């Protein structure tokens, strides 16, 4: 691939530059990887407002939500009012190869789509539990996350639901449950209920405590990936040593893998012609009313943590 190559109408530049410190990969490797897996990653990005993690030379990585002014006119966008910043944000919709390659050339390493589509902001397509082990991203920590993932799987089975699992590409795992475009408030409530049920299965291992200092070295079952939240896409690279990839794993094989097994260098060969994420994903499921009602009685983690933080701050001042 020459320095001035054009691919799918996208000019590619500075391809031989290192991607980021510790990546063990170049920008060329990122472009080639995303192009190789485009038919697998694009279905998870299509028609979903997208945030990306970019890394420019000499700068710290940053999350980009609002598309820059120089974005080509052929990149589809959708406007959304952001309460946090009190402004309208123009999100990209990464629907095709051309847009994906443009993002790759912008040194967008990570791809974080929403769990809603641009056509139905009020309906979630997936319920997600993000399983985050304590400490650094070592093999022992990942092993704890795997054990907690099996708790989540059991909680799902008890609720007559099924899901698929993937490495986060960082230190934990994500469990995805496709739902029948349920109201986002109902999905959020069901997520809280499932996290609480999984915690009760082994409270020594897992916790739903949102405040880090309250977790006591346990695996965090994060139930906040709901509503307008984003989750890194299957097959997305990560800004992690070795340029790891968030990769789908069969439940039967989860105990035998590590995050470093899946990188921009190894994944295309592991995939062959297959798409394990799509192949293993069950059909959309309905959430039981009992599960939703149970979750409605559980405080929203971020809100509860905010109030608790204020209470503790007042206590310290007093």
Image (cartoon, rainbow, N blue to C red):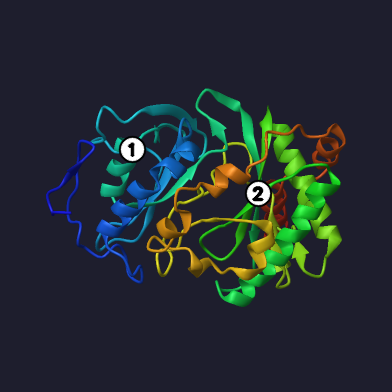
> Closer to the camera, 6 or 210?
6
Please give the name of the residue rendered at 20% of the width and 36% of the height, measured from the top-left corner. Answer: 9
- Choose between 228 and 316: the one closer to the eye: 228
Mark on residue 187?
Answer: none
Q: Residue at x 56, y 73 (%)?
A: 136
Q: Residues within 10 Å of mark 1 (few under 14, many from 20)?
A: some
Q: Where does label 1 land, which residue?
A: 97
Task: Give the image location of residue 212, x and y in percent.
Answer: 66, 65
Name the element at disc 1.
Answer: helix
Identify the residue at the far front of this view.
273
**Whether residue 170 can be seen here:** yes
User: Looking at the picture, how far across and down is residue 187, in whole percent?
Assistant: 71, 36
Residue 5 placement, left or right of 199: left
The residues bearing labels 1 and 2 have C-alpha atoms spaced at a distance of 26 Å
- Which label sits on residue 164? 2
The image shows residue 317, relative to residue 69, as above or below, that is below
Q: In the rendered image, which quarter contains the C terminus?
A: bottom right
The residue tagged with tag 2: helix, strand or loop? strand
Classed neighbour count for the residue bearing mark 2: other residues with Cα under 10 Å, few (<14), some (14–19), many (≥20):
many
Foreground pick, 1 / 92 = 1
In this image, 204 relative to 80: left or right? right
The quarter of the rendered structure image containing the N terminus is: bottom left
Q: Residue at x 52, y 63 (%)?
A: 170
């Amino acid at each position: 691939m020459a320095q001035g190559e054009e691919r799918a109408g996208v000019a590619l530049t500075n391809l031989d530059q290192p991607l980021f410190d510790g990546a063990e990969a170049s920008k060329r490797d990122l472009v080639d990887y995303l192009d190789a897996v485009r038919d697998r990653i694009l279905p998870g990005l299509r028609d979903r407002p997208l945030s990306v993690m970019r890394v420019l030379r000499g700068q710290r990585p940053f999350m980009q939500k609002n598309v820059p002014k120089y974005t080509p006119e052929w990149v589809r966008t959708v406007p959304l009012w952001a309460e946090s910043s009190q402004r309208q944000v123009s999100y990209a919709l990464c629907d095709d190869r051309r847009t994906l390659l443009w993002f790759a050339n912008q040194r967008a390493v990570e791809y974080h789509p929403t769990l809603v589509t641009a056509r139905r902001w009020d309906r979630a397509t997936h319920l997600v539990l993000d399983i985050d082990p304590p400490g650094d991203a070592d093999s022992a920590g990942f092993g704890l996350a795997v054990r907690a993932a099996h708790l989540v799987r059991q909680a799902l089975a008890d609720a007559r639901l099924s899901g698929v699992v993937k490495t986060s590409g960082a230190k934990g795992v994500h469990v995805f449950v496709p739902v029948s475009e349920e109201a986002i408030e109902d999905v959020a409530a069901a997520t809280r209920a499932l996290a609480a049920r999984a915690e009760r299965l082994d409270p020594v291992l897992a916790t739903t405590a949102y405040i880090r200092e309250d977790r006591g070295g346990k695996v965090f079952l994060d139930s906040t990936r709901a509503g307008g939240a984003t989750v890194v896409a299957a097959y997305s690279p990560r800004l992690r040593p070795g340029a790891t990839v968030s990769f789908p794993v069969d439940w039967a094989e989860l105990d035998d893998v590590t995050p470093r097994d899946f990188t921009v260098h190894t994944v295309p060969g592991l995939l062959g012609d297959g798409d394990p994420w799509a192949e293993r994903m069950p059909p959309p499921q309905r959430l039981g009313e009992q599960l939703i009602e149970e979750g409605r009685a559980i405080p929203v983690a971020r809100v509860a943590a905010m109030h608790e933080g204020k209470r503790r701050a007042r206590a310290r001042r007093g």
